[in-house]
Image: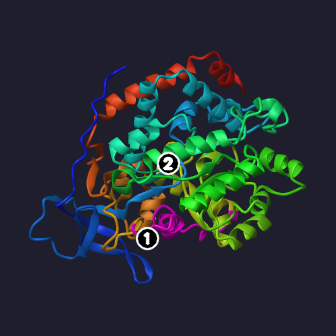
Amino acid sequence: MTRFQTPTLPDPRGKTTAVFGSYVLAHGAEGQEVLRDHWVILEDDRIAAITESRPAQADHVIDRPGRFVLPGLMNLHNHCFSEAIARSHAEDGVSKRNDQSIVYTVLLPLSKTGLDILTAEERMAIARMGVIQLLLGGATSVMEPFRNNLPEMFDAAAELGLRFWGAPYLFSASNPRAGTEGEVSYTASSTGGRDNAVDLAAWNALYDQWHGRENGRISLAMSPHATDTCDPDLLRAATDRARDLSVPITTHVAQSEGEVATIAKRWDGRSPAEYLDWLGVLGPDLLAAHCVYSSESDLALMKARDVTVVNCPRVFARTGKTASFGRFEAAGLRTLVGTDGYNMDLLGEINAAGIVSKVTRGDARSATAPALLNAITGAGSVALKRPDLGRITPGAKADLTLIDMTHPHLQPHYDPRRTLVSLANRANVDTVIVDGRVLVDSGSVAIADATTLTEAGAAAIRKIWDQPEAREAFAAT
C-alpha cells in the first residue's frame, strides 16, 4: 500500500484571511440574504467582519471574482465506509434480495467483514478517502455514523481538518442480519447473550478519547443504529447518557417497510416514531434519518417533539423510492439534507431533493432554493445548537465553502441561489475553509495528495470485494 505522509495543518492563529465573494450568503436580521461584491474577513478561527471594501492588510487573500461564498456546508448524515463498499453495487437493483433493504443484506454484513479482515492501516486509508471526498464535495461539518470498531474515522477527520461528529453505532446484536421476512433479530439466542452495555462502553471510551479534541473540532454524537436493531433498554440507556453529556442523538427511523412491520409486530402495533416516543427518545436533540415510511401522524408527533429529520433523497431514488424533502417541510419539521451512502455530493443532493419534492408533491414551489440551502447550513446549526456554525456572521466559526459560478453551465444567472441549487454540483466547489484553514483550494485538496489517498482507500475496499461473502452478496439481483 502506498505510504501516506500525515499533513501538517496550517495554523490560523494570529492570521487574517480576506475572502472576496461576488455573492455572499449572509445571515441578516430577517434570515438568509445574498450580498453582492463583499469581503468576508477571517481572523484566527472566527469570522471577524463582512465588508464592502477590501481590507488594507491581510495575511492571505482569496480574490476570485464569480465565487459564491457560502457558510461552511453541513452534511449531518453520511456513511464513508459503507458508501465505498456499495459503490456501483447498489445500482440498477443489483444486490436486492426479496425486495429487502440492502442495509441488512449488503451494507451491515460487508462492513463487519471488512472491519474483521482489514488492518488498521487499511481502515485508515478508507477513512482518509472518505474525508477527502467530503471536503471536495464542499462539506465543512459532518456527522458520520459508523461501526465502533472503525475509530480511524476520528483520526482521519482530525488530521485532514474536517469538523466532525463521530457517531459510533450501538446495536443490540453484534451482527444484525434480516431473516427471509426482513425482520432483524437481537434475541439472546441469536446473539449469544450479548449485553447491550458492550457498545455503550465502547462509545464511552471513544468519547473520553476524542470529544472536544482539535480545539473542539472533533465531537461525538450518540448513535443507536435503528429502531429495529436496538431494544428498549439500549435506547433508553443511550438516550440518558447522551442527555447527561449534552451531545446530539442520531438514529435511522422508518427507513424500510420491513422496519415498520418489525416494530409493529414487536411493540403492540407502534410505529418506529411511536416506539421512540414511548421510550422518551424523541426530542429536540434527535436527528432522525430518512423517516421515509413514517405516517402523517408520525410526522405530526415528531413535529410536536421538535425532532430534526435528515432527508437523503438520492440513496432512495436509486432503488425506485421517493424520499421527499417537501413532505417533511410541509409537516413543519426542521429538515436537513444529508448524503447518507451516496457520493457525498451535497450540491447534487439538494438538487435531487428539489426535483424529488416537486415531482412527488406536484408543486414547483415545494423545496425552494433558499429552503434547500438552509437545509445544509443554518438548519444544521439549529439542530446542533451551534449558532457559530452554518452562517456567515461576525463571531461565527471561520468555516466557508466557495462555489465557482463562472462555469458555462452556471452562466448567465439572475438568482445565484436558484442557479446553485438547480445546476451546480461538486465539480463547482472551489474552496473549503474550516477553522480558518484552507483545506480545498481551486478545486483540489490543499493539504494532502488526493491521488495517493484515493489509491490506498480503493485498494482496501477491493480487498473486501474479493471476499466470498461479498461476491455472493453482489451477485444477487
Q: CA distance from mark 2 to mark 1?
A: 23 Å
Between 223 and 451, the residue placed more toward the observer is 223
In which quadrant is the C terminus drawn?
top right
Instruction: Give, as a three-letter code, the residue at label 1.
Output: Pro
Query: Mark 2 = which residue?
Result: 207
Whole-percent x, y for residue 434 in the image: 32, 55
Q: Residue 294, can we see it?
A: yes
Quarter of the image holding residue 114? top right
Q: Which residue is mark 1?
A: 387
Vertical placement of 173 versus 68: above or below? above
Viewer-proximal residue, 325 or 76?
76
Callout 2 amino acid: Tyr
Q: Tell me: residue 276, above or below residue 187.
A: below
Q: What's the residue at 26%, 43% (across, down)? A: 446
**For residue 275, what is the image quadrant?**
bottom right
Count of numbered tags: 2
Horizontal and vertical percent position of residue 75: 49, 54
**Residue at horizontal 81 percent and vertical 34 percent from the top:** 188
Q: Which residues are magenta?
A: 361-388
Vertical order, 127 against 73 (above or below):
above
Q: Nearer the viewer, residue 300 or 116?
A: 116
**Residue 383 percent across, percent down from the top left:** 54, 65
